[in-house]
Amino acid sequence: MRRFFTEAFAVLALALFIASLMSDYGTTGKTVSEIVETLEEEGLLKEGDRSSGLMLRRFFGLEEEDYEGVYYSGPKGFMDVDDFVIIKDADPEKLTHVMDAFRRRIAEQEGIFASYAPEQMDLLSRAVVWEKGEYAVLVIGHEEEGLMAAVRSLIER
Amino acid sequence: MVFSNLFFLYVFLPVLLILYYLLPGILAKNICLLLFSLIFYAWGEPVYIVLMLIAIAVNFLLGILIENEPRKKKRTLVFALIWNLFLLGFFKYSHFLVDTFNALTGASIFLKELPLPIGISFYTFQAMSYLIDLYRGKYSAQKNILKFALYISMYFQLIAGPIIRYHDVEKQLSARKTSAVRLGEGLARFMLGLGKKVLLANTFGELFALAWNSGTVSMMAAWLGTLACTLQIYFDFSGYSDMAIGLGHAFGFDFPENFKTPYLAGTVTDFWRRWHISLGSWFREYVYIPLGGNRVSVSRHILNIFIVWLLTGLWHGADWTFIIWGLYYAVLLILEKYLPYEKVPAFIRHILTLLFVMAGWVIFFSDDLGQAGIIFTSMFGLGNTVVADRHAFWLLQQYGLVLAIGIAACMPVAGKIRDEMFERHPGALAASALILLALSTAFLVSQNYNPFLYFRF
């Protein structure tokens, strides 16, 4: 009996610890709406910045309704390279797909602006593609350092 | 937390020493040391303290089970080994296995990436050695969980060795001597190790990065970089071992030596008797000898060597470079064993050994085999490699003196001076240790986080 309890304890304790680690993303779990609301309150985003799901599909090939939460603020003019995307989903495969789409978008933009638009190329070279737990974030332009720091502080626990 | 950290040097260690020396009796001292060890471990990665506590509890209970149920002790040991190897394998190798499987089959299995628990390779090996030796009847099971927890979690050697066997410290867990002399000797050894790490290893690390990461690498820069990484890993790891042994000494423990002037080895076999001795002896005792050692047929002996060195490579990390590095040593050791190597003059054997070891570090330090190939190409002047360039001469000018000091410090004379000072000139020893502490502090103030290389193993 003592053997059974010892071995059961060994297996269960390790299994529970691993399960808790695997299910814990080390994030706050905030919804995308909550994050965006806070960013708007801090003046880092404006209410009218949000772009439509159509733009997300056009530039990234992503469908807004496929994910738990999506926010996209895209470029307003042809020469703008401002992109801010935050997507939340617990499915890691979906997030991998999103991250690929982010990188593809940057590569496409670089293809467009290479050799004649140094300012745009500079912004693209500073693009941030970031993944943490159930979140994927892309920031190009948008004063990326300040915005990214704020996003991280809202997502990371 | 790392030893080469100002908070550790000027807050954590002094507070612990004062408390430890003020507390009466072994029980209070053990509790104090255990609590501080857990705080030390939890400092950077608090979650994994739970994993270590689970490992302590499970191995403690399994140890008692092995002793109390002798007829089923083999079954218990097998369970214990599988459990510990699963613990190590899951956290250290699962990603490597999944990535390899995905690459081979085109599958896209996803596994959440978890940080490697610091010191897991060391404490699981300590736990396994405790249980195996207990099974072999070398000692009785530890019935006091505080003492067992202290054996597993002692902060001096918890995160980068040396791997301490239970029989080395069994008696010291219950009774140990502390004195002003031991404290002084221990701290002097600690400061010597600190100087090795901060003043030498970190400087060689800079040279190594500058030499290898400079785009096109000239032949001279490739050799300088290789020499730098050869010296860096020695001073980094032996420095850590000095610090661990010194701290152990200050707190009343006597740990075995982990390095004995390895770069003076006459053969590769000899090198591995002098380098990371605790790991080599662990594999010899718990893998090589149980497999039959050299008392088997030639083919079986060769297989045994390959198994041991494949595992040694894997122990260092879940990466193909470590596996190739391990197998590289297996091939060298087999050649030494079965070719008439002893007929080669001793001096040439020594030079060859150094070259083989340096080539090994090239594989070990490379990000992948492609980078190792580029460095080897540069070292031997193949392809379009130039013999020397301005960058290489600049490196030699900047780091020549410290390279000379490093090479001299690898010689036995450095150890003899140290031993002489320990035995006959305590005043000079104390003064030297304080100078090293002051210099190391000055370097640490201006440096960023600089963990020990062996933390990642």
Image (tube, grey):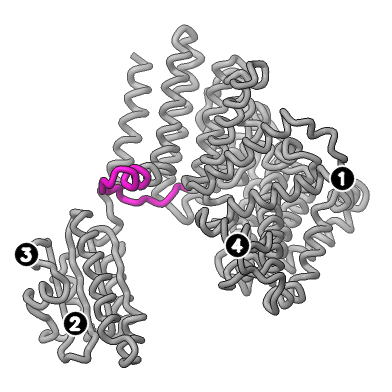
Across and down, in percent, residue B451 comes to: 57, 59
Picture quadrant of residue B226: bottom right
Residue B28 in view, yes or no? no
Q: Which mark is residue A41?
A: 2
The residue segment tinted magenta is: B99-117
Across and down, in percent, residue A67 comes to: 12, 62
Q: Which residue is mark 4?
A: B5
Quadrant of the rendering where the N terminus of chain B is positioned? bottom right
Amino acid carrying label 4: it is: Asn
Q: Nearer the viewer, residue B383 or B340?
A: B383
For the residues marked 3 and 2, what is the alpha-carbon distance in whole angstroms? Answer: 26 Å
Between marks 1 and 2 in the image, the one whose residue lies nearer the viewer: 1
Q: Residues within 10 Å of mark 4 (few under 14, many from 20)?
A: many
Amino acid carrying label 3: it is: Glu
The answer for which chain carries disc 1 is B
Amino acid carrying label 2: it is: Glu
Residue drawn at 72 percent across, 62 percent down = B200
First in sequence, mark 3 or 2: give its number.
2
